[in-house]
């Protein structure tokens, strides 16, 4: 416990320093949701059209926004004024920034529970990975969102499962789903694991536990969605939660499988056009930042939400099989992280920020082995770098670079020290101890080349592209970031799959 206040105090000071930074339109989104939930009756929350920023998170998060609106109205009444648009007064910025930092306490609680059984050095490294994540700092405390709060509840659920408290873990996960529906991708793993691990012990005991879990989870969903069923708004709620008309990809491509699919389609269209084939031009442009109501591919088959759903299930099926036949608490973090990675790699309209859903949980097991540490070192850097385009103003450029570089240095030193000490404790040969102390062994020469190329892409996008090409091909820097990070993400997904097949 002595480490926890120190970690929290340092990161709290850093968050305070980030208060004056740029904030995205997500700031106005959440500010409007505060005003909406405090000004309108509950049955109008999901039908209100007074702003483009309509409420599209599940009801428990809406209730969370309502709770935040109570002190907000005393702090600055304009925050909860439904007719205030694009509000960015110093008091509003201060209150909302502090609300994000305060809600991170749930992440702190989860990190403490997960790292409590670890020896001191491993505990410090785990706290560093979970609480000082540069990607989380960029997304929540500069760009502006509440991912730390949501991930804290998610990790709390995993901590309870790891402790064998399955019923409470299932209840907390239901609360996560009722707060952010994108965690639904982890539901199959939870279902299979709880069915096989919690609902065991013979026919009578198993049936009783299954009913207990079902009633408890149903009670959470009833508390969240029940009022909207009562007011006849449940269909409107689901239309807001699942807007499939947004298209396969976001304007800035998340670094996943669909990047390669898009590039292949464009490459084939270009080649076939050169050979005289008539290739229809899509109405929506992936590289122009517009998102249409369908997947506008010129050559390859169109992709629908059903296709992505089936691909996600197929990709996570090895994990589900493992969870069914060998439901052990020590593997639950790896299984759930892999399921979230499958959703990120093959899901519909994925944002780059969704990589946090598996990068943060993988920090819990990053010190399990040297292989896990190598994988996490590369993955966390790639995930953070893929979010650099979120902060596009010049004054924030040094911030995002320093956050990533400093975090990489801390990881490098922490992993090298920890695994050197561990091999010494185990009495391994001196040559092996020396080998694990080398920095190059943490990522290997291929990893060094890959990460070095990220630096080259950044130099091109920030300095060389404007100088050489000017205003031509404005999409090229973002496209290079997406493609290069997608290579790293595909490697991470394949590595996680291999670990599950071989060791769980």
Image (cartoon, rainbow, N blue to C red):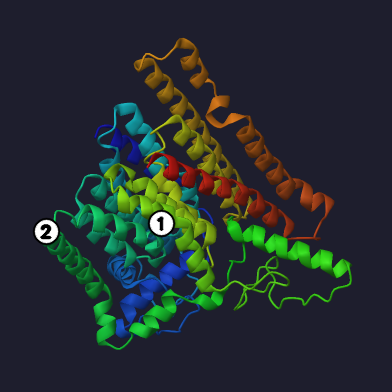
Q: Position of residue 408 (x, y in %)?
A: 52, 35
Q: Position of residue 292 (x, y in %)?
A: 62, 76
Q: What is the distance, in whole Å, between disc 1 and disc 2 at their CAs?
A: 38 Å
Q: Residue at x 22, y 71 (%)?
A: 218
Name, please, the residue furthest toward the top.
Answer: 430
Label 2: state its secondary structure.
helix
For discs 1 and 2, the disc positioned in front in the rendered view = 2
Say if residue 82 shows up in the picture.
no
Q: Which of the image's four quarters has the C terminus? A: top left
Using a 10 Å C-alpha cutoff, classify the residue at mark 2 as few (fewer than 14 neighbours), some (14 to 19) or many (20 or more): few
At 28% from the left and 65% from the top, the residue drawn is 71
Q: Which mark is residue 205?
A: 2
Q: Nearer the viewer, residue 342 or 462?
A: 342
Relative to residue 403, is residue 205 drawn left or right?
left
Of helix, strand and loop, which one carries label 1? helix
| Marked residue nearer the N-terminal end (1 or 2) | 1
Answer whether residue 226 is visible to the viewer in this image.
yes
Disc 1 marks which residue? 147
Residue 107 location (% of width, % of height): 32, 49
- Depth order, front residue of 285/164: 164
The percent coordinates of residue 418 (x first, y second) are 40, 25
Q: Residue furthest left?
A: 204
Query: Along the line of sight, which residue is nearer the eye, 176 or 105?
Result: 176
């Amino acid at each position: 416990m002595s480490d926890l206040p120190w970690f929290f105090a340092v990161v709290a000071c850093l968050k305070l320093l980030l208060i004056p930074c740029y904030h995205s339109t997500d700031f106005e989104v959440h500010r409007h949701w505060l005003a909406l939930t405090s000004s309108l009756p509950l049955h109008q929350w999901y039908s209100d059209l007074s702003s483009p920023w309509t409420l599209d998170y599940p009801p428990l998060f809406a209730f969370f926004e309502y709770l935040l609106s109570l002190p907000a109205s005393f702090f600055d009444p304009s925050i909860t004024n439904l007719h205030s648009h694009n509000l960015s007064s110093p008091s509003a910025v201060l209150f909302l920034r502090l609300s994000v930092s305060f809600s991170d306490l749930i992440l702190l609680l989860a990190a403490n529970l997960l790292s409590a059984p670890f020896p001191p050095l491993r505990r410090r490294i785990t706290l560093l990975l979970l609480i000082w994540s540069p990607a989380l700092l960029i997304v929540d405390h500069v760009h502006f969102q509440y991912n730390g709060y949501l991930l804290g509840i998610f990790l709390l659920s995993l901590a309870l499962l790891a402790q064998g408290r399955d019923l409470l873990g299932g209840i907390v996960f239901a609360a996560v789903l009722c707060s952010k529906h994108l965690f639904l991708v982890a539901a199959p793993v939870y279902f299979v694991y709880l069915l096989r691990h919690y609902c065991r012990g013979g026919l009578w005991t198993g049936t009783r536990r299954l009913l207990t879990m079902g009633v408890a989870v149903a009670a959470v969903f009833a508390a969240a969605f029940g009022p909207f069923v009562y007011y006849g708004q449940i269909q409107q709620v689901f239309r807001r939660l699942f807007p499939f008309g947004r298209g396969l990809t976001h304007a800035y491509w998340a670094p996943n499988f669909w990047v390669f699919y898009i590039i292949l389609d464009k490459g084939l269209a270009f080649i076939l056009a050169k050979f005289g084939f008539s290739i229809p031009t899509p109405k929506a442009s992936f590289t122009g930042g517009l998102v249409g109501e369908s997947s506008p591919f010129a050559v390859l088959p169109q992709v629908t939400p059903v296709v992505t759903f089936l691909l996600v299930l197929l990709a996570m099926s090895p994990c589900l099989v493992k969870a069914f036949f060998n439901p052990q608490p020590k593997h639950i973090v790896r299984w759930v992280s892999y399921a979230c990675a499958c959703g990120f790699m093959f899901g519909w309209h994925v944002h780059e920020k969704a990589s946090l859903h598996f990068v943060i949980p993988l920090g819990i097991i990053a010190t399990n082995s040297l292989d896990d540490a190598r994988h996490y070192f590369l993955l966390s850097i790639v995930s953070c770098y893929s979010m650099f385009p979120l902060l596009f103003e010049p004054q924030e450029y040094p911030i995002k670079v320093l956050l990533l570089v400093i975090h990489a240095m801390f990881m490098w030193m922490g992993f090298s020290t920890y695994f050197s000490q561990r091999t010494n404790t185990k009495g391994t040969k001196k040559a092996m101890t020396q080998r694990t102390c080398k920095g190059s062994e943490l990522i290997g020469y291929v990893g060094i080349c890959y990460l070095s190329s990220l630096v080259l892409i950044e130099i091109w996008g920030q300095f060389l592209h404007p100088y050489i090409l000017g205003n031509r091909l404005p999409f090229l820097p973002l496209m290079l970031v997406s493609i290069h990070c997608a290579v790293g993400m595909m490697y991470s997904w394949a590595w996680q799959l291999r670990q599950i097949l071989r060791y769980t």
